[in-house]
Amino acid sequence: MSPAVTVLTGYTPEDFYADPGLAFRLAHPEDRLEQARAFTAGTDGRTLTLRWIRRDGRPVVDGAGATSVCGPKGAPDGG
């Protein structure tokens, strides 16, 4: 988790590590399905544009690539 996430969302990397579901709850409700797809399958090199709801309630748009990281059993793993 990049420290730049604090500028984008108002939450620190530590907030995300302490609450693994935080990133999903911050995604705009209309973007959550696309976010879940990217989390499980990656984006195949394309940029994923999502709307986030910042800690202060303001929306922000972010474009980023997503790569799945799988744990020892092959399931997606945030760490």
Image (spheres, helix red, strand yellow):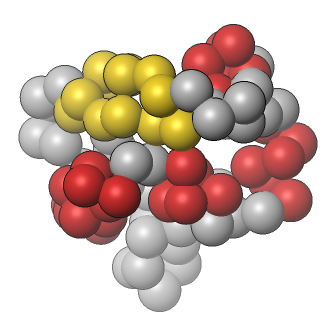
Q: Nearer the viewer, residue 10 or 46?
A: 10
In this picture, is 61 found above or below 40? above
Q: How many marks?
A: 0
Q: Which corner quadrant holds the C terminus? A: bottom right
Q: Nearer the viewer, residue 58 or 13?
A: 58
In this picture, is 4 found above or below 17? above
x 78%, y 63%: residue: 19
Is residue 1 visible in this depiction of the protein? yes
Horizontally, is 51 left or right of 47 in the view?
right
Q: Which corner quadrant holds the N terminus? A: top right
Q: Quadrant of residue 46?
A: top left
In this picture, is 14 found above or below 22? above
x 24%, y 29%: residue: 49
x 55%, y 60%: residue: 25
x 69%, y 64%: residue: 20
Is residue 38 visible in this depiction of the protein? no
Q: Position of residue 72 (x, y in %)?
A: 53, 78
Q: Quadrant of residue 29?
A: bottom left
Q: Position of residue 26 (x, y in %)?
A: 55, 49
Horizontally, is 74 left or right of 2 in the view?
left
Q: Position of residue 53 (x, y in %)?
A: 53, 38
Q: Quadrant of residue 54?
A: top right
Q: Position of residue 44 (x, y in %)?
A: 11, 40
Residue furthest front as drawn: 57
Q: Nearer the viewer, residue 53 or 70?
A: 53
Horizontally, is 45 left or right of 58 in the view?
left
